[in-house]
Image (cartoon, helix red, strand yellow):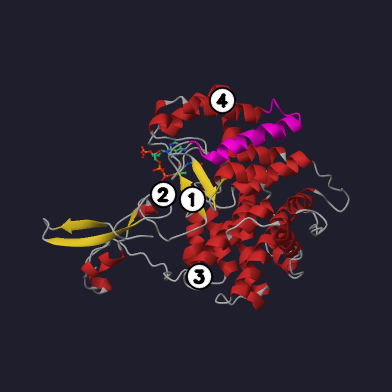
């Protein structure tokens, strides 16, 4: 970060002026450091943080115009092709790719933490069976702090590392438990002789009476989904985790806050919403009507899986997801899948439409991830929980980065107040 250049803000016909340092990152846009502005009595106004860099970070970089995504400097295309999800977890948490020895130790560490406290099983029984899995996830992940309070000293690097490993290891077990609970099947314990993704698929898709036989193409597809969703810089849920953590809250509570934020359809809930939308459209002949609805400002309907706050070009994750989608459907002999064909046609029509071209609305990662998950036998209501499982590592890395940032302060935005000025309370009888 350098501050040799300054930007000058002037107001009241240049009677008042303030020089503000310009900071440069290693790549990406420069930022105007407005921290000294509050001393002038002025604030900035930026709903949705469209023009605000809320922190410094070294984890993930996005160039939305060029369609670039880097994890710790490595392009997502290379990471998705050459690494598996746990390797990516190591990279995101530690900043470097592991060597063979480091990887073996990390895998062993995660694997030894896959089981959850037995009493957590009872916790599930308080939920209705028809609860949405994300509702259960928010509660159960938040409850982990009541089970693992031996490692909650956030000032201790060791404690933070243990909590990170526990979360990466246990969230898949909890996601699978959420699913089993809602369909009334017994929980499946993790099998530590299986690799991370295979173990998760087994916990989700097998029963005590029915063994799970892994198909490597499908395991790799889910692994890739997890890689593509592992981190995405200061998105809404990651910013939520950082904000929750800025008060000193424990990591399990912070991740539960992130899960709650992720649930919304504008964010992680989009993968579920895409599938629901495709089912609702139902047939290619109805695409035009839905495109028109998406373009109608008086209609709240949006084309789910389209558009992104940062990407104003193809989401690089969507391109990889599209290829994975083909691989999975070919493997399963579902090349003529109704919803996949509908999605491809919808994408074609939208990309040729002036509205979507002008507003730079391209398919995002969630446009195709739902189709892949559905083909893997995972029900729609579980899609966002799987996104949460993938993003857990990113959330923890950001939480840890925030805690160790010497410039970190409690997150406390201000406001542009537009309510009543001071007024006096009159007695109720005279109102
Ligand atoms: N369909 C139709 N119009 C859209 C869409 C869409 N999917 N997305 C944006 N627009 C329009 C929007 O109405 C606005 O129009 P106008 O300029 O006339 O007001 C313009 O494009 C700019 O959009 P915005 O809503 O101001 O942009 P944003 O950065 O605030 O929102 C978004 C980004 C992702 C929330 C939004 O594009 C959206 O709701 N997309 C659908 C939901 C979705 O797919 N979300 C997943 C995001 S990727 C996974 C993740 O990160 O969680």
Mark 1 residue CB less than 8 A from any atom of ligand 1: no
Per the image, the residue denoted by label 3 is: 404
Q: Are marks 2 and 1 in contact (CB under 8 Å)?
A: yes
Of pointers 4 and 3, the one earlier in the residue sequence: 4
* 10 Å crowding of disc 2: few (<14), some (14-19), many (20+): few
Per the image, the residue denoted by label 2 is: 28
Relative to residue 170, is residue 276 drawn left or right? left
Q: Are marks 4 and 3 in contact (CB under 8 Å)?
A: no
Relative to residue 400, is residue 292 drawn left or right? left
Mark 2 residue CB less than 8 A from any atom of ligand 1: no
> Residue at the location (59% across, 54% down)?
391
Q: Quadrant of ligand 1?
A: top left
Element under label 1? strand
Q: Is residue 320 magenta?
A: yes
* 10 Å crowding of disc 3: few (<14), some (14-19), many (20+): few
Q: Position of residue 414 (x, y in %)?
A: 33, 65
Dividing the picture into quarters, in which one does residue 94 lie?
bottom right
Per the image, the residue denoted by label 1 is: 61
């Amino acid at each position: 970060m350098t501050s040799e250049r300054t930007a000058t803000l002037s107001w009241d016909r240049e009677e008042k002026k303030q020089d503000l340092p310009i900071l440069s990152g290693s790549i990406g846009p420069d930022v105007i450091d407005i921290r000294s502005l509050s001393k002038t009595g002025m604030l900035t106004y930026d709903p949705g943080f469209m023009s605000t860099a809320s922190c410094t970070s070294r984890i993930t970089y996005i160039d939305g115009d060029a369609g670039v995504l880097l994890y710790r400097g490595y392009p997502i295309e290379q990471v998705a092709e050459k690494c598996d999800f746990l390797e990516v977890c190591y990279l995101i948490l530690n900043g470097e790719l592991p060597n063979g020895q480091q990887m073996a130790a990390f895998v062993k560490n995660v694997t030894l933490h896959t089981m959850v406290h037995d009493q957590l099983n009872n916790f599930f029984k308080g939920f209705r069976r028809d609860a949405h899995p994300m509702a259960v996830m928010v509660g159960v992940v938040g409850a982990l702090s009541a089970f693992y309070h031996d490692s909650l000293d956030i000032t201790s690097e060791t404690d933070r590392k243990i909590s990170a490993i526990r979360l990466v290891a246990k969230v898949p077990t909890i996601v699978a438990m959420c699913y089993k609970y809602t369909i009334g099947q017994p929980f499946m314990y993790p099998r530590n002789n299986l690799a991370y993704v295979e173990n998760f698929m087994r916990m989700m898709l097998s029963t005590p009476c029915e063994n799970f036989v892994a198909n490597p193409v499908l395991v790799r597809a889910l692994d890739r989904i997890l890689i593509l969703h592992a981190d995405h810089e200061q998105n809404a849920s990651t910013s939520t985790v950082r904000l929750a953590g800025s008060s000193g809250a424990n990591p399990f509570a912070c991740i539960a806050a992130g899960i709650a934020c992720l649930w919304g359809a504008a964010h992680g809930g989009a993968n579920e919403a895409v599938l629901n939308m495709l089912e609702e459209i139902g047939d290619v002949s109805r695409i035009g009507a839905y495109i028109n609805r998406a373009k109608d400002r008086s209609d709240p309907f949006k084309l789910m899986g389209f558009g992104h706050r940062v990407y104003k070009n193809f989401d690089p994750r969507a391109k990889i997801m599209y290829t994975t989608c083909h691989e999975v459907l070919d493997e399963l002999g579902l090349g003529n899948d109704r919803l996949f064909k509908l999605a491809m046609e919808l994408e074609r029509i939208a990309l040729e439409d002036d509205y979507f071209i002008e507003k730079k609305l391209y398919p995002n990662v969630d446009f195709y991830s739902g189709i892949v998950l559905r083909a893997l036998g995972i029900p729609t209501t579980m899609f966002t929980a799987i996104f949460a499982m993938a993003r857990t590592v990113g959330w923890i890395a950001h939480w840890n980065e925030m805690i160790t940032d010497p410039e970190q302060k409690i997150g406390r935005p201000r406001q542009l107040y537009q309510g009543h000025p001071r007024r006096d309370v009159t007695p109720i009888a005279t109102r």
